[in-house]
């Protein structure tokens, strides 16, 4: 009978130890999982910000170049002359030549 009582005590201790171990592992897993998820999210966010800033820089350079082109084209004397005399074919050809030069 004493052996049976010791066995029941050993089973209880085993069950309690297992429950504590499983609970501890679950808490540890949740903690590590949430920290890793936060780190990955921050890393992805930083990469996306870098990509957006890179693309924005490329777009800004393109827009600046286009603005310079349009300004130079609009301020050329050929364009002014063409606006004053829109039916003159010689002025029209000069305007097209200026446009080609500025595109290069």
Image (cartoon, rainbow, N blue to C red):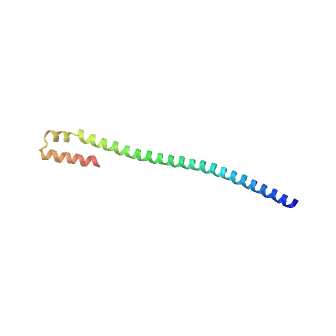
Image position, residue 104 (x, y; %)? 29, 49
Kindly identify the residue that appears in the image at 27 percent across and 42 percent down. 70
Location of residue 57 by image quarter: top left
Name the foreground residue: 92 vs 27.
27
Q: Quadrant of the N terminus?
A: bottom right
**76 or 27, which is in the foreground?**
27
Name the outermost residue toward the right. 2
Q: Is 46 placed left or right of 30 in the picture?
A: left
The residue depicted at 18 percent of the width and 46 percent of the height is 94
Count of number-bearing discs: 0
Q: Indicate left or right for 60 with 92 as reference.
A: right
Q: Where residue 14 sits in the image (x, y, percent)? A: 77, 57
Tell me which residue sits at (28%, 48%) in the image. 103
Residue extending furthest front? Answer: 1
Q: Which is nearer the eye, 77 or 82?
A: 82
Residue farthest to the left, as pictured: 87
Q: Position of residue 25 (x, y in %)?
A: 68, 53
Say above or below: 30 vs 77: below
> At 23% across and 40% down in the image, what residue appears?
76
Q: Is residue 50 left or right of residue 103?
A: right
């Amino acid at each position: 009978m004493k052996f049976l009582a010791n066995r029941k005590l050993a089973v209880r201790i085993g069950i309690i130890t297992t429950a504590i171990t499983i609970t501890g592992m679950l808490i540890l897993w949740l903690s590590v999982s949430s920290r890793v998820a936060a780190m990955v999210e921050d890393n992805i966010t930083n990469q996306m910000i870098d990509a957006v800033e890179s693309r924005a820089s490329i777009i800004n350079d393109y827009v600046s170049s286009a603005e310079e082109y349009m300004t130079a084209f609009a301020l050329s004397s050929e364009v002014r002359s063409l606006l004053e005399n829109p039916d003159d074919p010689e002025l029209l050809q000069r305007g097209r030549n200026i446009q080609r030069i500025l595109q290069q």
